[in-house]
Amino acid sequence: MKILIVEDEQKMSEYLCKGLTEQGCAVDLAANGVDGQHLAIEHDYDVIVLDVMLPGIDGFSVLRALRKVKETPVIMLTARDSVEDRIKGLHDGADDYLIKPFSFLELLARLQALTRRGRAQEPAQLRIGDLQIDLLSRKAFRGGLRIDLTAKEFALLAVMARRQGEILSKTAIAELVWDMNFDSNTNVVEVAIKRLRAKIDAPFEQKLLHTVRGMGYVLEPRATADSSDD
Amino acid sequence: MTEAGEDAVRLRWLPLRQSITARLVWMSAASALLIFALTGMVLYTVLKGELLRHERDGLVTTLNDISYQIARAGNTERWGRVQAKLATLSQADQHVSFWISSSDARFTYGDLSRLAPQAIRADEGNSVGRLHLPGRRYPLHIMTRTLPAFEERPAVDVTVGVDGEPYFEMRRTFLLATSVFSLLGIVLAVISSYWIARAGLAPLRQMSDRAQSFSPRRLSARMPVEAMPQELSVLALAFNGALDRIEDAYTQLEAFNADVAHELRTPLANLIGETQVALARERSAGEFKDVLQSNLEELDRIRSIVNDMLFLARSDQGEAATARVPARVADEVQKTVDFFEFVLDDSGMRIEVAGDTEATAMMETALFKRALTNLIQNAIQHSPEGALLRIDIACQEETVRVAVSNPGKTIDEHHLPRLFDRFYRVDSARQDINGSHGHGLGLAIVKAVARMHGGRAFASSKEGVNSIGFTIARQ
């Protein structure tokens, strides 16, 4: 995935560049609106991360100039948590926006969602290690054994399985499973993960559902037991 | 005061920003001018009329005096005596003149037609005419009477003239005196009204001096209402009312700032301390990883507090819920209850949804669910295991009311209204029964969401059931 980051704050652009490169993305950086606009128009990116407050030309102007030429997906970063900004950004043709301070995981999820759009139909069967999930009949098997899950437990498992190997924050899980798109300050997700883990992981040697402390949860087969697991 | 002066008055006191003293002075000057001008005009008109009447009476008397003799002078001999008498009278009083004209040249006295060729006839109704003589400053007042023919004499016109000087001099003197006194009166009015205004406005000046001394350091300072004149005490009361509200807001803000600082200080202290300890000596990557993970948790806590505070600040600034859509309240309640399915299951609790399940309202569903999530979370935290919680939906005239009730320790009356204050905790020990994830902003957010939907938050506590909820406008 080829990404352009237009951000004047050095610390932020550095860690975004590092994090995205480590995720296997090719990242270009621009520290002001003029360079950003030039790069965005001259090159073909899969997605552009665009800060609103920029020296030179601001993010909205860059976006307007870009939209006259091409339809590259754009995520706006804004520090001003106001409705006007959001409306203005989306009206000018931004595909998504994130309010600072945002979490890196959140950005990653949004980037993937934007580039995933229009991709081929997802498979009806998912497989993580020896865990097999049938999304159509809503059944899960592990080592050939049927695992009995409630509707919400299955929804949680399906969300994690569709994004296997991807760390999902508690907020993201709450949004994807329960449509609760706000910081809820509850322990609902922890409790849910605990229940799911009891059903899909507890009876088996190899653990699949891992806790990444401070960040969230990930569903993936790991070679060795993770020390940070609960 | 001249015309131009009056114009200046009008132009200068029109703007309201002019000082009150100046306005009062201008206004009393203008009214003094008006009063003196009117009085002077009336007096002058009356005086003029009276003087003229006096002149006419004099002329009529003189005419009567001489007419008797002239009427009986039928021949030249007698006419000679008339002429002699008239000459004597004119000489005795320089101010009086006589003329007699007729068709017969023998029976005449003086030549009026030479002085006034236009032949003044002012005999009807004893009216007074004026005759301007060359070399005289003031005209003569004249009166003419026609006497019928007698014996040899034809009909004659007898004219009496009186010098107008005393009359005109008196008028002039009166006008001058009135003007001078009026002018003096206006000057006096200006001076006295300036003094009155200064003295009358003294309480206002004291009030402003007093207000100058108010500052955030002296928040409890107030206007002394008792010592104020009646008119100002209303203003002082209103002013004090505003000060009360500002003091409340200020105190609340200060407490809030202190709370914010405190809430942020703990995670910040953890971050700094932990990082310092980690860096103090060589450590393995695993150990550093632990520190970073722990730091991330603290940072997440800070982010959450900051985000919630920004949300509250926006609500404080009067931001309303903009993306409101019509929704069935019970549906959104059920979705939120479903969110807690696992948590409720774990602690053996149940939630019963009751009331008007058909009620609909305009709402931003994410905000509604956020508020309700906070309420349910709060109820779960303060209930014993296995408790039955209740959510009541009630449709009211203009609002829909949603209340979450849980069995629990009765909350003191004085805590109830303050439950929705930021960082407010009923028990000073900052620990909840079922392990808190919140940071004391949950119920403040409920209140903010209610306000953004044109409703309000409420709380009650009796007979071991605590009920906290909010209303939102139906439309």
Image (cartoon, helix red, strand yellow):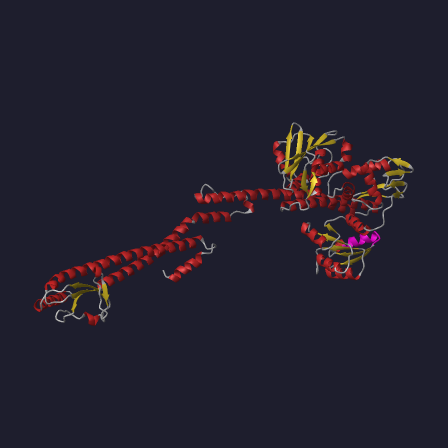
Q: Is residue A79 left or right of residue B40?
A: right
Query: Is residue A205 inside the magenta stretch?
Result: no
**Residue B250 percent across, percent down from the top left:** 59, 44
Front in this rendered view, residue B463 or B296? B463
Q: Residue at x 14, y 62 (%)?
A: B67
Q: Quadrant of residue B375?
A: top right
Question: Is residue B284 something one can see in this rendering?
Answer: no
Q: Residue at x 66, y 31 (%)?
A: B466
Which residue is situated farthest in the top direction here? Answer: B463
Question: Is residue B320 something one can see in this rendering?
Answer: yes
Which residue is situated farthest in the left direction here? Answer: B77
Query: Is residue A14 inside the magenta stretch?
Result: yes
Quadrant of the image containing the N terminus of chain B: bottom left
Quadrant of the image containing the C terminus of chain B: top right
**Residue A40 percent across, percent down from the top left:** 77, 59
**Residue B473 percent across, percent down from the top left:** 64, 40
Magenta span: predominant SS is: helix
Q: Residue at x 60, y 42 (%)?
A: B252
**Residue A67 percent across, percent down from the top left:** 75, 58
Front in this rendered view, residue B112 or B206? B112
Magenta stretch bounds: A13-25
Give the vertical position of B393 relative to A110 (above or below): above
